[in-house]
Amino acid sequence: MSARPHLARACRLFALIASMVGGEAQRTAAQGTDSVRQAIDHVFDKWHSSDGPGCAVGVSRNGQVVLEQGYGMANLETMTPIRPTSIFQVASISKQFTATAIMLLEQDGKLSLDDDIRQYLPEIPNYGSTITIRHLLTHTSGLRDQWELLYLARGRFEEDRITEADVLDIITRQTALNFTPGTESLYDNTGYTLLGVIVKRITGKSLRQFAADRMFEPLGMTSTHFHDDYTMVVPGRTSAYESRVGADGPWRVSTPNYDVYGATNLFTTVDDLLKWEGNFDHPIVGDAAMLARMQVPATLPTGDTTEYGPGLRRIRMYRGARVVESTGNDPGYQAYLARYPDQKVAIAVTCNAGSAASPTGLAHGVADVILAGALAPRAASVTQAGIAIPVDRLQSRVGVYVQPTTLAIVRLVMRDSHLAFDGRSGPTLIPLAANRFAVSGEGGEIVFGDGEHAGFERRSSGQRPVPFVRQESKTPSAAVLGRYAGEYVSDELGGAVYHVTASDSVLLLRTATAGPLTAHLMFADTFVAGGYTIQFTRTNGEGLAGFEITNPRMRRVKFRKRS
């Protein structure tokens, strides 16, 4: 079991609650600090264990720490508990630190955010459209995601060390972008790795050293560094775990195995993260104007704003309160960092339990306790009953639909006399009108066009409708699938070879180092394999030339068929 907070911290927590807002928060404080501590302990009930990993949590107000606590184990082999001083890898939370380094260099007059990145990275191919530093910062560059490319090229990467050179090698092989720079927003890690390289080429210092000199030392973040050596010993570091079966273990070691940093690989503690959050209210690194710019989302030519500003500072609402937040997710680690600017409260949660942990949910639970009466009541859940539509009319909507830009594929099926997304747990569609359906459990709506075989638009509040086009489904057979068998190679993936074999119902795509991808035929020359869309290409519409593979962060990576 983890240790309880010290009395001094408990007293500071009492002062925090008493100094906040009236009403319920005051009444909660009057019950004593024990009830507050117990309420926060209850949020982490699942992680009160000496035989599993867990989380650390820190809370500050006006830059002053009022609560720090650890739950669960930092290392299951040495039986070391998690403490507030335990060091975690915080994955994509790293990006805001990389962005800050770039913004500081802009202040120094060493670069402009509108510079062409090829000024600093001449090895990046010329795609016919300029990619700027601003595009990298705001996830609007169109570059394919490095991790997706490396996984396709290797077939796996959990066991194989990955370096910055590996990323640069595969990025410079790409012959196309996901989209024209600046026209879309699509989260990618590649841009932030390249930003780290830009820092090194401008300053002559690694991002690790630059960040230490200009950010971490001035803020007293003594337990924080960008990790550029996978083999380096880090005293106080937590081990990372994933569950083999379910959320409760048994556990296996799952440690990130890369020396790549900029997009990820920041090692830090909850205490240091709170110091970083305090800098936004009382700047020591940068100034108020620079920090404010980092929290302004980018604007696309359509006039739409993206979710991301430089450094991934997302402004959202939680129970009526503004929150500026970042999240991180890497093998074995998850993290969440947020600041409630109106209440001057910051919350950091770091976990070493991989996908079994939900630091965002845990942090919201902490906010429920700490902010109490400053938050609006939870919205009551509403169950939509829907209207009656004849089954044969619903049946006419069954089929395969594709999003033309992202190539995402949706298959609608009938389940228990209801229209639903394919898959055992796919959401049910609740009919609101003959052509309009609510998506159960997910929010938003699907609106079909005119005609029984029309496509649909997926509509979500505050976003443009996303169109899906209906396709004629194809039935697999040994004769049909056998035509796709063969050997395919990708020059964009460094000569990676995939062997395609056919059964009566599926294709299997194998590399030499990993288990196969199982591909199901959807419509003409188009298959789905896990999260990938695989489209076979033809020469003059006849013989097979190869295939292109797409997923949400990587579009149309090319393979050619070997004779």
Image: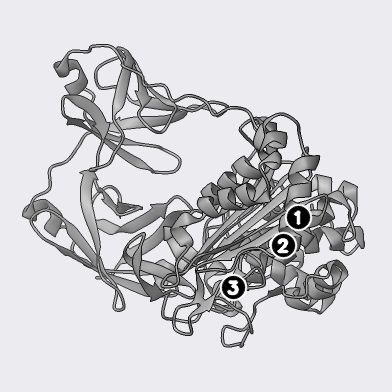
Q: Which residue is mark 1?
A: 11
Determine whether the residue tagged by mark 1 lies in a helix, strand or loop. Answer: helix
Indicate the quadrant where residue 496 lies. bottom left
Q: Which residue is mark 2?
A: 7
> Residue sitting at 61 percent across and 66 percent down?
264
Q: Amino acid at mark 1?
A: Cys
Please indicate, yes or no, whether residue 386 appears anywhere in the rendered image: yes
Tell which of 23 and 321 is nearer to you: 23
Mark number for residue 90?
none
> Residue sitting at 30 percent across and 59 percent down?
545
Q: Is residue 81 left or right of residue 103?
A: left
Tell which of 135 and 10 is nearer to you: 10
Nearer the observer: mark 1 or 3; the answer is 1
Residue 416 percent location from the top left of the image: 16, 28
Q: Is residue 544 left or right of residue 55?
A: left
Determine whether the residue tagged by mark 2 lies in a helix, strand or loop. Answer: helix
Label 2–label 1 contact, CB within 8 A? yes
Q: CA distance from mark 3 to mark 2?
A: 51 Å
Residue 13 percent location from the top left of the image: 73, 52
Please indicate, yes or no, whether residue 133 appears anywhere in the rendered image: no
Q: Amino acid at mark 3?
A: Leu
Q: Is residue 366 left or right of residue 99?
A: left
> Residue sitting at 45 percent across and 67 percent down?
49
The relative height of residue 433 versus residue 470 in the rendered view (above or below) is above
Disc with the residue nearer the chain's start (3 vs 2): 2
How did the renderer colour the structure?
one colour
